[in-house]
Image (cartoon, rainbow, N blue to C red):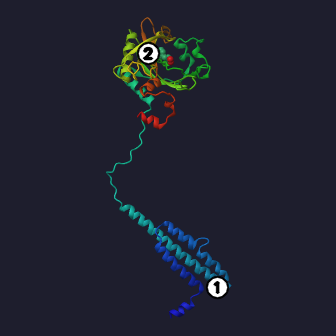
Amino acid sequence: MFFRYNELMSDLDQKLSALASRFDAALSDAPDEKALDDLRVAYLGRSGEITLIRRSIGELPAAERPEAGKTINAAVEALEAKLQSALSGLERRHLDAALGETIDVTFPSAPAHLGTLHPIRRIMNELADYFERHGFAVVLGPEIETDANNFDALNIPPDHPAREGLDSFYLRPDLLLRTHTSPMQVRTMRTHQPPVAVIVPGKAYRRDAIDARHAYMFHQCEGLLVGEGFHFGHLKGMLTGMCRALFGPAQAVRFRPSFFPFTEPSAEVDTTCPGCGGSGCKTCGGSGWIELGGSGMVHPNVLRSVGYDPDIVTGWAFGFGIERIAMVRYDMSDIRDFFDNTPTFLEQLG
Ligand code: PHE
């Protein structure tokens, strides 16, 4: 019986069933998705075994060809189904393995990457803290200013060299990027009756060529105190406190006579070099002092231009460079490091 059956089995059937048993054996040995895919290519791929068998149909009598085609298609379907179920089996095994893993929920996680405040922002925050503790308000002004506010109202006459287009960024003849934060003195006094006590942290712009000490954009902090009876002694007291808050309790402040059109008298402000405590080092160029910026008693013409009476109120103002303070604080030699925003640099200061 068995013999007869075998004898009756067509050549095609024999080929297919031999192929199926080889396929089954290979399938049960296939360890992973890659092996399954190799099998698919070897048997069902364009130049795989099935394709070879399909080609042999051409040798059959025409009448037998459709039947042979069907037989081959059925065999292909069977192989595909087996591949598919092997694949699902693998996926289930992967999942089971993953679910079987024990997770230690107490294990410390990878640290999250936390940013830090930019050093310029930190100095501005410290200045704001100090002055707010002493009753000053923090106000911000526009970076695009009228040249009336940036110059005229500050007693800077039209022929003053500071107005030179080479020094400033003009948007129109009457509008420019403010060259200092001082125009906010004027804006504040015009809209508020004395006494006023404000600081103005913010950006200022000058057409300076960029080098280790200059940038076309930098930060300043303006200070203004106007009311009855204020004098230079109050300025020195406030600034000494400010320098001690920034750099430590040993700081002293000194004034050097200077000139600004909007203050009279005017002074440059220096503080003890925190690098050497005043004995002289590379940071302070051997002088023992670090320059912070300009200051002075608000000029009567400025008070008049905002409608204040200089016979009744007096006051002082200062304007310091934040980068300057930060460079001394963080012992930096190149202002460009602030603006390159290299995380490695900023993180060192964190
Ligand atoms: N605005 C001046 C500058 O940028 C600094 C300054 C401010 C001087 C206030 C005196 C009073 O250089």
SS of the residue at dot 2? strand
Name the residue rendered at 46%, 23% in the picture.
324
Relative to 99, residue 290 above or below: above
Name the residue type under label 2: Val
Q: Residue at x 34, y 48 (%)?
A: 108
Give x and y (percent) for residue 346: 45, 34
Residue 81 lies, in percent from the top left, at 51, 73
Judge left or right: residue 104 versus residue 55: left
The residue that appears at 67% across and 86% down in the rendered structure is 61
* Residue 13 occupies quadrant: bottom right
Which quadrant is home to the C terminus?
A: top left
User: Is residue 230 among what the camera can see?
Assistant: no
In the current view of this chain or complex, which residue is farthest to the top?
Answer: 311
Q: Residue furthest left?
A: 106
Judged left or right of residue 74, residue 92 is left
Q: Going by the image, does 275 lie left or right of 159?
A: left
Q: Quadrant of residue 271?
A: top left
Decide: few, some or many residues near mark 1? Use Cα within 10 Å; few <14, some 14-19, many ≥20: few
N-term mark: 1 or 2:
1
Q: Which of the two residues, 348 or 66, is positioned nearer the viewer here?
A: 348
224 left or right of 177? left
Q: Amino acid at mark 1?
A: Glu
Q: At 44% across and 69% down in the image, what residue appears?
A: 89
Which residue is label 1 attached to?
64
Q: Is the residue 57 above or below the residue 42 in the image?
A: below
Q: Position of residue 82 (x, y in %)?
A: 49, 74
Residue on which disc 2 sits: 269
The percent position of residue 20, horizontal first and vertical second, equals 52, 79
User: Of discs 1 and 2, which sits in the foreground?
Assistant: 2
Secondary structure of residue under mark 1: helix
Circle 2: is it few (<14), some (14-19), or many (20+) Cα within 10 Å? many
